[in-house]
Amino acid sequence: MTHKTLALAAVAAVALSACATYTPPTEQETMAVIKSSFKDRGQARVDRLNQTDLQKLCTATGNNPPKDVRERLEKAARATVRYPADGKWLGDFKQGERIAQTGVGMQWSDKEGAPAGGNCYACHQLSRAEIAYGNIGPSLNAYGKLRGYTDEVKKYTWAKIWNTHSFNACSSMPRFGDAGILTEEQIRHVMALLLDPASPVNK
Ligand code: HEC
């Protein structure tokens, strides 16, 4: 071995022994650090860090609970969905586009109770005219055109927006209806953005 390779081997050995002695923090230790780093401010309160039972199960299983558990969680989530009482699924797609574009709401600096946005573009492509969008979620461009404008599709889409866990237990999409982020009226507008044949999403 040359001096150089010897030195490299020594560095590697030190790095390896460092790995071997590292013990990751426990769940409780992690939560203690997180909770001590935040404080209540306006409507953004530390109790938001408390996970629901579903979230705890998803965390504990690396977002991959056993099939029977997943199905039980999704069924329970579907039972929370409140469908429009008057059977009217669609509102105004223009207002839907604004809601999808808006990310305000629920932050400490927002007025408590003021209407929040859906921030859909943060994770999805929707109308083609908007070129700034995130891709954590699938593209929703041409959503209605591709799936059809049937009541079945409307019911599925409403439930997905109301409580995303209805069809994917460990989804990372917000629970817009269930968590009180959007009102029923706002969800109708977003529904129209996805499912009105005249919406720019379907053009
Ligand atoms: C933080 C990211 C995030 C935000 C914000 C978000 N979504 Fe999603 N959405 C996802 C992800 C990820 C999926 C796919 C995985 C899943 O089903 O959970 C998804 C799936 C969907 C689906 C199902 C698509 C399909 O192929 O069946 C619809 C419909 C949807 N989102 C609509 C919306 C609407 C409307 C908004 C805004 C009101 C929104 N999403 C905001 C992350 C997000």
Image: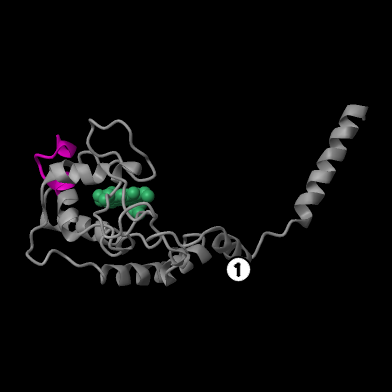
Residue drawn at point x = 84 percent, y = 34 percent: 8
Front residue of 121/61: it is 121
Residue situated in front as seen by the camera: 52 or 109: 109
> Crowdedness of circle 1 by 10 Å Cα count: few (<14), some, many (20+)?
few
Q: Quadrant of residue 138?
A: top left
* Identity, as a three-letter code, of the amino acid under mark 1: Gln
114 relative to 8 in the view: left or right? left
Q: Is residue 152 above or below residue 195?
A: below
Q: Is residue 86 visible?
A: yes
> Residue 192, position in %: x, y?
14, 48
**SS for dot 1:** helix
Question: Is there any visible trace of residue 65 in the rendered image?
Answer: no
Quadrant of the snapshot with the C terminus: top left
Range shown magenta? 192-203
Residue at horizontal 30%, vertical 55%?
Answer: 111
Image point (26%, 70%), residue name:
80
Quarter of the figure with residue 1: top right
Relative to 200, say whether 92 is above or below: below
When asked about the image quadrant of residue 173, the answer is: bottom left
Residue 2 image point, x, y percent: 92, 27
Disc 1 designates what residue?
28
Based on the picture, tell me whether residue 200 belongs to the magenta stretch. Answer: yes
Q: Within 8 Å of ligand 1, the CB of disc 1?
A: no
Q: Position of residue 72 (x, y in %)?
A: 36, 72
Q: Which residue is nearer to you in this view: 187 or 202?
A: 187
